[in-house]
Image (cartoon, helix red, strand yellow):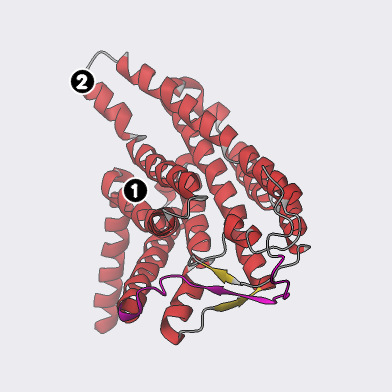
Amino acid sequence: MEPTANKHQGNQTAVTEFILLGFGDLPQLQIFLFLLFLVIYIAIMSGNILIIVLVVAEQHLYTPMYFFLGNLSYLETSYTSTMLPRLLAGLLTGDKTISVTGCIVQLYFFCSLAGTECCLLSVMSYDRYLAICKPLHYTALMNGRLCLQLVVGLWIGGFMSVSIFIFMLSQLKFCAPNEIDHFFCGFHPITKLSCTDTHIVEVAGLISCAMFTLPPFVLTVASYVYIISNIMRIPSTAGRQKAFSTCSSHLIVVTIYYGTLILVYLLSDSDALRDLNKVFSVFYGVLTPLVNPLIYSLRNKEVKKALRKALLRSFVFFRNSNF
């Protein structure tokens, strides 16, 4: 990795704000994009908040699996809220500026929540591994205390993991041009605008990213290798289908999340594929939180049962209130 110092030697004007170009090359679609992302944002918030309410309100969902699912839904609402409100404001008002401090803060929350989600998905896969491969010991191994400790640990770890390199990033000097060709503040676009040496910051960012993505990814893959091998040993087709149904929703979510995340990082340094990078960033940053509630509600019998009960209670309440 080559040091990037003095790459703006011809223009050393210090800047205090960046311009998020976003989808500025499509001026005729700004209103359409605003309405589209507004509907998506409302759907994301509504779907994930509904999951949280169901997990809290329904006692038969008081299990480790749904405790983790409630945390995932809360994480998705936070994750999306780091990007979409700023994007919506830019599309509506045309003001695409963001202060350097605001940009770094957005990056901090984005990276922290991304790392937390990777860890949470791996914990959920380990939970499914215990439920399917060690059913007789599941209750003893995955108890309420351990679930709470895992969730608290991964939330704290996710936010602490990026603190050092974000602090180092905040000490850099940024020079013109100050345009970021993306719809949110990413790590690579920000470092490219620095007119000081970013080598140490980039190494720190790489180490932090590797620590909170590779081990969870390996754990997730290993869990599903054991899960699938265990399911294939079940003699009856009905038994295999029943066992697989308990983890199929999570497997779909993991595949979508890691698939799009890997594509984004493969394309992150490619100027020729910058527009494609934006598309895949939308997929993992916006569409993944959108489809998660749909996947869990449509493919999970317990969630559908809880949803029907909640709708029935709401119907009875409003019917009685009218009288």
294 or 314: which is nearer to us? 294
Residue holding disc 1: 296
Residue 145 in view (yes/no): no
Q: Main secondary structure of the magenta part?
A: loop
Q: Is residue 94 above or below residue 306?
A: below
- Distance CA(mark 1)–CA(mark 2): 23 Å
Q: Position of residue 208 (x, y in %)?
A: 67, 44
**Left or right of 252 in this view: 83:** right
Density class for disc 2 (Cα within 10 Å; few <14, some 14-19, many ≥20) is: few
Q: Residue furthest bottom?
A: 93
Specify the amino acid type for callout 1.
Answer: Tyr
Q: Residue at x 50, y 58 (%)?
A: 74
Please give the range of residues in magenta. Answer: 9-28
Q: Position of residue 83 (x, y in %)?
A: 50, 66
Asked whether 252 falls inside the magenta stretch, the response is no
Q: Which mark is residue 246?
A: none
Q: Is residue 261 above or below residue 26?
A: above
287 or 197: which is nearer to us? 197
Q: Residue at x 32, y 27 (%)?
A: 243
Q: Position of residue 300 (x, y in %)?
A: 31, 44
N-terminal of the pair, mark 1 or mark 2, is 2
Specify the amino acid type for callout 2.
Answer: Thr
Disc 2, SS: helix
**Left or right of 298 in this view: 8:** right
Give the quarter of the figure containing the N terminus: top right
73 or 25: which is nearer to us? 25
Residue holding disc 2: 237
Disc 1, SS: helix
241 or 118: which is nearer to us? 118
Density class for disc 1 (Cα within 10 Å; few <14, some 14-19, many ≥20) is: many
